[in-house]
Image: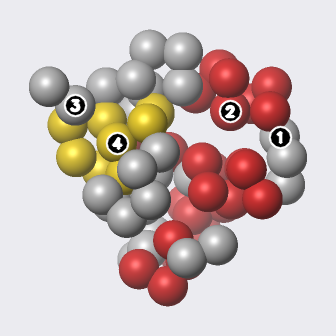
Amino acid sequence: MGCKATCNCEEKHQGHLCVLRSKELTDEIAQLTDNPKVACFTCGAEANSPDNVCAPVTIN
């Protein structure tokens, strides 16, 4: 995934949606995206928490 090249989160990157998608962990993704508050500036993925994307921006 392209997110790793721009992510500076080190070990926290493993909980990001781009990593979870690459591992096809759809149940985990569903739980982390059911009420999105942020989007990843890098890939556009939407998540409930900024902890689950590489470059979070608030969704209006």
Going by the numbered disc 4, the residue's amino acid type is: Ala
Marks 1/2: CA distance? 6 Å
Marks 1/3: CA distance? 24 Å
Disc 4: which residue: 39
For this orientation, the residue located farthest to the bottom is 5
Disc 2: which residue: 29
Task: Specify which label sits upstream in the sequence, 2 or 3.
Answer: 2
Marks 2/4: CA distance? 14 Å
Q: Residues within 10 Å of mark 3 (few under 14, many from 20)?
A: few
Instruction: Look at the picture and state if 50 lies above or below 48.
Output: below
Q: Quadrant of the C terminus?
A: top left
Kindly identify the residue that appears in the image at 57 percent across and 52 percent down: 16
For this orientation, the residue located farthest to the top is 35
Disc 1: which residue: 25
Q: Quadrant of the N terminus?
A: bottom right
Going by the numbered disc 3, the residue's amino acid type is: Ile
Secondary structure at numbered mark 4? strand
Is residue 51 in view from this perspective? no
Task: Specify which label sits upstream in the sequence, 4 or 3.
Answer: 4
Going by the numbered disc 2, the residue's amino acid type is: Ile
Secondary structure at numbered mark 1? loop
Secondary structure at numbered mark 3? loop
Disc 3: which residue: 59
Task: Specify which label sits upstream in the sequence, 1 or 3.
Answer: 1
Secondary structure at numbered mark 2? helix
